[in-house]
Image: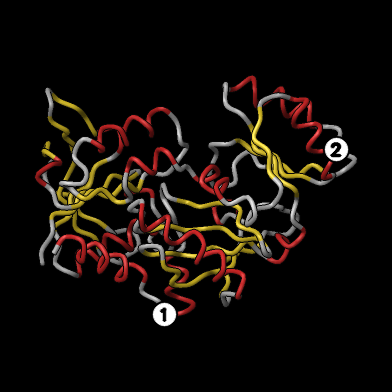
Amino acid sequence: MKLKVAIQMDPIENIDIAGDTSFRIALEAQERGHELFYYTPDKLAYEEGIITARGWPLAVRHEVGNHFTLGDEQTVKLADWDVVWVRQDPPFDMGYITNTLLLDMIHPDCLVVNDPFWIRNYPEKLLVLNFPDLTPPTTIARDIKTLRAFKEKYGDIILKPLYGNGGAGVFKLSVDDKNLSSLHELFTGINNEPLIAQQYLLDVTKGDKRVILVDGVAVGAINRVPAKGEVRSNMHVGGRPEPVEMTERDLEICARIGPLLEEKGQIFVGIDIIGDYLTEINLTSPTGIQELERFNGINTAALIWAAIEGRLT
């Protein structure tokens, strides 16, 4: 089966091919004989009833400094393509939301991965709220009194933007820390969004586990260990990936959330687990498959493409 595959992603010239998940997905698609087309999120458009994208035919190769070639720029009608990948990174802002609304207009006749309706309605830090028994104590609020009461109850907490990504804006406040009001003023002065606060989990010093699921089934995990002096384990901010085995608790969490992910058309998902707690369910632009392949030999990209091809046969 040869598919026409469009990839909506951030500028390809800036990626690190040793770790970038979108690159690995594109490379696997090319190796399976699929045709690739690449465009950046700002090139998606609605034109008189037609969803279009202005971009380039794409060829990729695993060569540092020479990892892609673009054909001539052209505007395509996305409904003519078999698959559209949403691989732009957050922030999950109105631009991101608008793109999912536009892609809704071609899905599912054109398979958009992941389903844009549920990307929009289940952002990373909100879908986990459906599973309060699996998550650490959490509050989402803009009201300082609510946040202060939460901190007084749990002592050490993590405070972060609800729609942030990559570890940006994440703060650990210890029981004696007096900066909650100042941080609240800072965040609320930037936008009108609420904040999310969670009880600090000491187990994060041992790592933040990223578990990859394909069609709701766990395929493997990596551990991300914070750099010295850091509370954030994100690889964007110096977290160190290392191999790890999945525990019974990890499998229990995946068994609970997997059926919902499959039902909602979320083909490729990355969840975050600290100790025994689920902290995020990443639908927008999950990462980690290259590290998993290096550590465990699991070709997640091939599993993802097999799931997509299975849906289109």
- The answer to whether residue 305 is above or below residue 137 is below
Residue at the extreme right of the image, as rendered: 176
- Helix, strand or loop at mark 2: helix
At a point 41% along the width and 27% down the height, the residue shown is 94
194 with respect to 59 (left or right): right
Q: Residue 182 sits in which quadrant?
A: top right
Q: Residue 73 sits in which quadrant?
A: top left
User: Crowding near pointer 1: few (<14 within 10 Å), some, many (20+)?
Assistant: few
- Helix, strand or loop at mark 1: loop
Q: Amino acid at mark 2?
A: Glu
- Viewer-proximal residue, 288 or 79? 79
Q: Residue 139 sits in which quadrant?
A: top right
Q: Which mark is residue 297?
A: 1
At a point 38% along the width and 48% down the height, the residue shown is 14
Residue where numbered disc 2 is placed? 152
At a point 16% along the width and 34% down the height, the residue shown is 52
At a point 39% along the width and 43% down the height, the residue shown is 119
**Residue 142 on image: x %, y %:** 66, 26
- The answer to whether residue 233 is above or below residue 129 is below
Q: Amino acid at mark 1?
A: Gly
User: Crowding near pointer 2: few (<14 within 10 Å), some, many (20+)?
Assistant: few
**Residue 205 on image: x %, y %:** 73, 62
Q: Can the viewer see residue 238?
A: no
